[in-house]
Amino acid sequence: MKVDLYERIWIWAAALMIIAFLAAVIFSAGSHAVHPPSRIETVDPTKVLTEGEFTQAGVTTREDGSVLVTGLARMFVFTPGVMRVPAGVPVTFRLTSPDVIHGFQIVGTNANAMVIPGYVSQFTVTFDRPGEYLVLCNEYCGLSHHLMQAKLIVEEAP
Amino acid sequence: MSGVELPDRRLEVQHFAVAIAAFGLGAAMAVMQALSRADIPLPMRSEKLYYLSVTAHGVLMALVFTTFFIMGLGYFVARETLGKLEWKGLATGSFWLALFGTLMTTVAILSGTSTVLYTFYPPLQAHWSFYVGATLLVVGSWGFCAVLIRTYVMWRKDHPETPTPLAFHGMLVSVIVWILATSGLAVEVLTMLVPWSLGLIKTVDPVIARTWFWWFGHPLTYFWLIPAYVVWYTIVPRHVEGKLFSDQLARVVFIMFILFSTPVGFHHQFTDPGIDASWKLVHTITTYMILFPSLVTAFTVIASLEVAGRLKGKKGLFDWIGALPWKDPFFASVGLAMLTFAVGGFGGAINAAYAMNAMVHNTAWIMGHFHLTVGTAVALTFMGLCYWLMPRVLGRELKFPKLAIWQPYLWFVGMTIFGGINHVVGLMGMPRRVYSGKFLDSEVAKGWEGMTLISAYGGVILFISSLCFLAVILGTWLWGKEIAPPEVAFSEPLEATGKAGLWDRFGFWTVVAVVLIIAAYAVPLYDLYTMPRFESLPFKPF
Ligand code: HEM
Ligand SMILES: [Cu+2]
Ligand SMILES: [Cu+2]
């Protein structure tokens, strides 16, 4: 196939650009373990309100000093509605839904996960900046979807 | 009529008419949504109406307008390049079936029983007629696919050596991509949503449903885009008196879309539980591969336009751009569509970035992104093409030519505002699909207020542009002066492809694509189906 010189240059440039993009993505995934939330764990959505860890939604500090937030996203509230966590400490979120799909987005951070009934979403974030953050649902879940929100308060580390 | 016999175009006209009607309805809903998000107190503004309208707008624009337009264009291209259509009865039957399905789904949405948005993720459950209507639309589109494939096979028998005419080559690729895409949708709808909405099964698994949906959802975007590329490659260069820069490369580009447009769906599910991170990474890699044919297209198309400028005697680095017919409504639409696509495609590379995706997932950024890509690169190309098609198909001169020339520029301005500001406010964290951006007067949300207002202005400009478009189309159809239809001519390449070869082996490439799809999906789907899971009962919070 005859390919014009400029075109050949462009094809190579495009290929290189794509390889560079991919290298960046794979490198960051490998070296800093930046993965999107991908927990594989299931839970019975008809029972999460009555039995098991999600009946005790709240913030707990574990022995190693890391923090666990167990939470529920449901039409149209998050529990706990206010989460207080320390700055500079890894915070692990474990979330699920007893009804439809919701989103869990902490505005101003890159914490962003789908919360899907029947599954547990889990991810860990370290908040460096103390302050008050808006947590909102970013997946349509019904007519009051736009009201579904919570507050995350990151406190100065003790 | 002045003695010129118009060929029979009934089939194409029917398809375009449905497409344009869907567009008009979708545009009316759109402006209301844009105003609502800015908390402008319209009369009758309500949550119920907003989400209903977003459902209707998404379905009418993304599924009905595009599919019908592409079917009409496919028939047109087949007739023009291969000389005739086989199985015309099937084509007509499929049209009515698809139209019936569309009406069924539209009624389901407007009745308020199916406010599930155009992604219809379970366990939100719509009325069964929503899913059944959508199924009929897709089955109708399969009739279209069968007609195009049959027409090609018969043509190929008579022309064993001739390379597939490029315009048809692209349309056939689009057909193949559509078949690969809708196979996933069929599994979701037929094995899960239809029986579930009829009460035959009680529960469905939302992650499995999303996986089948996005098996469909990403190649869907290429099903829209490839016909736009067909216009860019094979109609525009000729229209501006240029030549297609590289015929061979265009074929390679189309074939790459067959290969890579489907095994990428997890880039829409990056933040989903239930899917292993390593499979998400695999889909990231294939997603970047699909960037390649689009980058090549950018070069070839721009080079073809440059050839046009050069043939008009322009010698400088950029002065050929000025030599292009920017006052021609068809060219202006396509030129602006391309420009918008350059920006939109760049944003796409960010969405696809595995880890960066978390910054933008489900925010207004995504909404900004697809309005630049499908909402402009594709839709504005199609609107522009209508200006080119009307005289050729109906034998009528464009009515209101001034409006026709203003229309693409208005769209461009409106979309630059609307798309641009939604990218920005999305980065600031504002989610998509919200009736109001206030979030109970939270401090952060106050920072979004001015932006949603600007976005609403963009929406109003877009709406005015839509009205101009509809006026020109209706005016031409009803009152346009009858003329001898101009010639339908496709671009000549600088260098023609000699003989049919590797790039005409559609069956072979489809098999390779199926292998890639199996490689990308078999294991994660097997894992999902076989692990202990708890499925969901239906919910109707609307
Ligand atoms: C008349 C110009 C248009 C305007 C003013 C407009 C405006 C909007 C608005 C305000 C939304 C809702 C955003 C949200 O709350 O997240 C939306 C959603 C959407 N639009 Fe448009 N749009 C226009 C044209 C188009 C076109 C031409 C297409 C595609 C061919 C399109 C496809 C979509 C899709 C797929 C959605 C997503 C619905 C969803 O999130 O469920 N729009 N549009
Ligand atoms: Cu929600
Ligand atoms: Cu995609």
Image: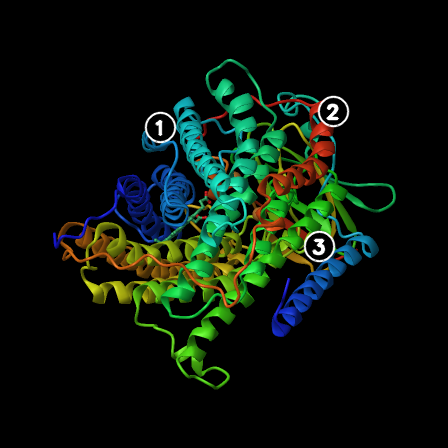
The residue at which mark 3 appears reads as: A155
Contact flag, marks 2 and 1 (Cβ < 8 Å):
no
Residue B105 visible in the shown view: no
For the residue labelled by badge 3, is the local secondary structure a helix, a strand or a loop?
strand
* Outermost bottom residue: B316
Label 2 C-beta lies within 8 Å of the nearest ligand 3 atom: no
* Left or right, residue B451 beside residue A35: left
Name which quarter of the figure residue B288 lies in: bottom right
Can you give x and y, in whole percent of width and height, for residue B123 in the image? 54, 28
Q: Which mark is residue B97?
A: 1
Crowd tier of the residue under label 1, counting other residues whose Cα lies within 10 Å: few below 14, some 14–19, many 20 or above: many
Residue B22 visible in the shown view: yes
* Left or right, residue B528 beside residue B12: right
Q: CA distance from mark 1 to mark 3?
A: 60 Å
Q: Nearer the viewer, mark 2 or mark 1?
A: 1
The residue at which mark 2 appears reads as: B531
The residue depicted at 47 percent of the width and 60 percent of the height is: B233
Q: Chain of mark 1?
A: B
Q: Which residue type does callout 2 highlight? A: Met
* Left or right, residue B315 beside residue B347: left
- Figure check: B432 above or below B215: below
Q: CA distance from mark 2 to mark 1?
A: 39 Å
The C terminus of chain B - image quarter: top left
